[in-house]
Image (tube, rainbow, N blue to C red):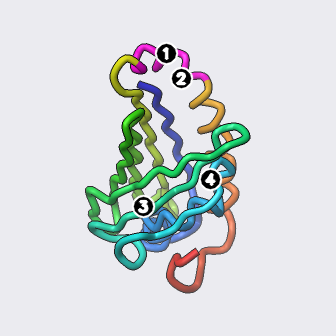
Amino acid sequence: MARYVTEVHTPWPVATAFAYMADLRNFAHWDPGVRTVTQTEGDGAGPGAVFDVTVRTGPTAIVLTYRTVEFDEPEEALVVAENRLLTSEDRIRVTPAAGGGSVVEYDAQLRLKGVLGVGDFALRPVFQRIGDRAAAGLRSALEGTAPETSANG
């Protein structure tokens, strides 16, 4: 299993940061590995929301369908994508920060399935580089001005 965990401090209130993070349509704003996000079920973040996330894989791209399987607003959400090759689990936690604002923790796990699982070890350094780029984009996004309206991307 490849795993990437990052924490980002933001001046945004907990509810605002959670709303932004839990609405996966915003992923394309901060993760350079994401080309597009389309919501296919639901309206914004929430229980049962489903998003098709188109992810760059070198010169091509794949679509991962993420389902919101846990949603505890405004603190935690878990979205999971699964296909015949892999399972991706992304957990978002938002907590109050000492002195104001909030802390966003993003915990991403990627597991290859079946015989591909032997490649998990080789996947770790690649996933680390992907995660580092996404974390830099996330820090930049969350340091800016909080969105005034809903996080509809």
- Name the residue that disc number 4 marks: 34
Badge 3 element: strand
- Name the residue that disc number 2 marks: 124
Residue drawn 41% across the image and 25% down it? 1
Q: Are marks 4 and 3 in contact (CB under 8 Å)?
A: no
Badge 4 element: strand
Badge 1 element: helix
Q: Is residue 150 above or below residue 101?
A: below
Instruction: Report the number of discs.
Output: 4
Question: What is the spatial separation of the Cα atoms under label 1 and label 4, in whole angstroms?
Answer: 23 Å
Amino acid type at image mark 1:
Phe
Q: Where residue 113 sits: x, y (%)?
A: 36, 27
Amino acid type at image mark 4:
Val
Please give the label number shown on residue 6: none
Closer to the N terminus: mark 3 or mark 2? 3
In the rendered image, the residue lying farthest to the bottom is: 149
Amino acid type at image mark 3:
Pro
Q: Is residue 45 above or below residue 150?
A: above
Question: What is the spatial separation of the Cα atoms under label 3 and label 1, in whole angstroms?
Answer: 35 Å
